[in-house]
Amino acid sequence: MESLKEKVYDWKNRLKDRHMLSIIVALIAIIVALGIYAYKKQTEYKQVSENAYNMSFYEVVSYVDNVESYLAKSLISTSPEHGAETLTYLWREANLAQVYLAQLPLNTEGLSNTAKFLNQVSDYSYSLSHKNIYDEPLTQEELDNLKTLHDYSVELKNTLNQLSDEINEGRISWGELTKKGNVAFAQEVSNISKDSFSNLEENFHEYSGLIYDGAFSEHMTSSNPKGLTGEDIDEEKAKQIASQFIGQDKVEEITSNGLSENGNIPSYSFYATLKNSDKNENVSIAISKKGGHIVYMNCDREVSSENLSQEQADEIGKVYLNNKGFENMKETYYLKQEGIVTVNYAYMQDNVVMYPDLIKLKIALDDGEILGIETTGYLNSHTQRNLPEVKITKEQAKENLNKNLEIQSEGLAIIPTEYKTEIFCWEFKGKVEDKEFLVYINAENGNEEDILVIVNTPNGTLTM
């Protein structure tokens, strides 16, 4: 009987051991499965991130190719009308190249100078297009400047193509740049074309005189951006802000492209795919590291019809800006291309136009969708100013105007200078015969500070 009890006890122990073993095996299986799942998800995330970086880089290569082509065309154009069209396209392509360049997770001197080069091409071509629009041919000096820019664009194009080959051969893995502290890898990438970037750096100094800070240019930068307020945020917080800015109900997936420190506003950039979009819309967006401000958002889609007037688009833009926290904005000048109007809005303080505080909006004229926003000018310059006393009355300022100027509107404005200072002025818009002008008279001493020609074209209202 004792022997039977021992056998039963032994049998129970064996069952217990087998049960524990089954539990252990099951736990191990679960852990392995979770590990495989986590590894798979991490691999998928890396691949998505890698694809996003590659997309941004190839967009840069494509737009720089277009910049080189339009610069070449501008050298042989003999018609001011065709020249204006070519230079306007050049301005647009250089701008778009800058947008995608800022999304790359590299902070090297070569890429910083590349951004500067594209900015200068954009501004210079914009200024020359105004001359052509006004039916003025380019001077030999201006053509020589375009030739110089074209030479540098060829060199930049070759450098980017070399980097493109390295990516295709697998020597560059953009995803590695998202790892914290991986400075060595970033250095390796920047050294791949060290000689080419060094040559570019030397050449950039040679043509620095070509910098064009056009009238109230939205490209003005500051070493201490006044509108960049708040504490530093991390990438996850920036991702939340980006999703909220686009609209969380619209976002299917949002992927980080890392922190970009090109330019004077370090920012986190993201790539978002939208839910249920029948327009094949994808969004690029950047949020500043300091304060979590929107730096830019861009969505490229085809607009096949124009159902809205310019006035309707202006109002849609103001409502949008107000809803996004940018209050008291006034539309200034605009450019319309292929069913999309790009409008500059300036901040208003006490009925004074603050031209340095500019925000650019891209508005689709088919349904009023906001396709893009760029706030660089606003973030660099915006602050509540202590406006100086108006020492020159409006009537006194008018005494300094040309007697033939037929005044259409008048008001106060703060205008920027090429020295990155600001001047408090009376702004007079008027006509002399069939030409429209903006004249700026210093509201403190009565000096004539600036005169701009207003050019009304089928595609927009520009100044020069």
Image (cartoon, rainbow, N blue to C red):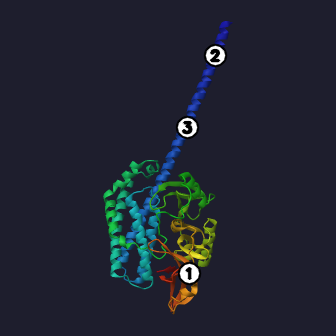
What amino acid does circle 1 point to? Lys
Q: Are marks 1 and 2 in contact (CB under 8 Å)?
A: no
Residue 15 location (% of width, % of height): 63, 20
Element carrying mark 3: helix
Residue 47 location (% of width, % of height): 48, 50
Inter-mark Cα distance, 1 to 2:
106 Å
* 316 lies left or right of 112: right
Element carrying mark 2: helix
Q: Which residue is mark 3?
A: 33
Eye-nearest disc, 1 or 2: 1
- The tag on residue 391 is 1
Inter-mark Cα distance, 3 to 1:
77 Å
Instruction: Answer with mark 3 or mark 2, whichever residue precedes in sequence.
Output: 2
Residue that appears at 46% across and 56% down: 53
What amino acid does circle 3 point to? Ala
Residue 98 image-quadrant placement? bottom left
Q: Which residue is mark 2?
A: 11
Residue 270 location (% of width, % of height): 52, 57
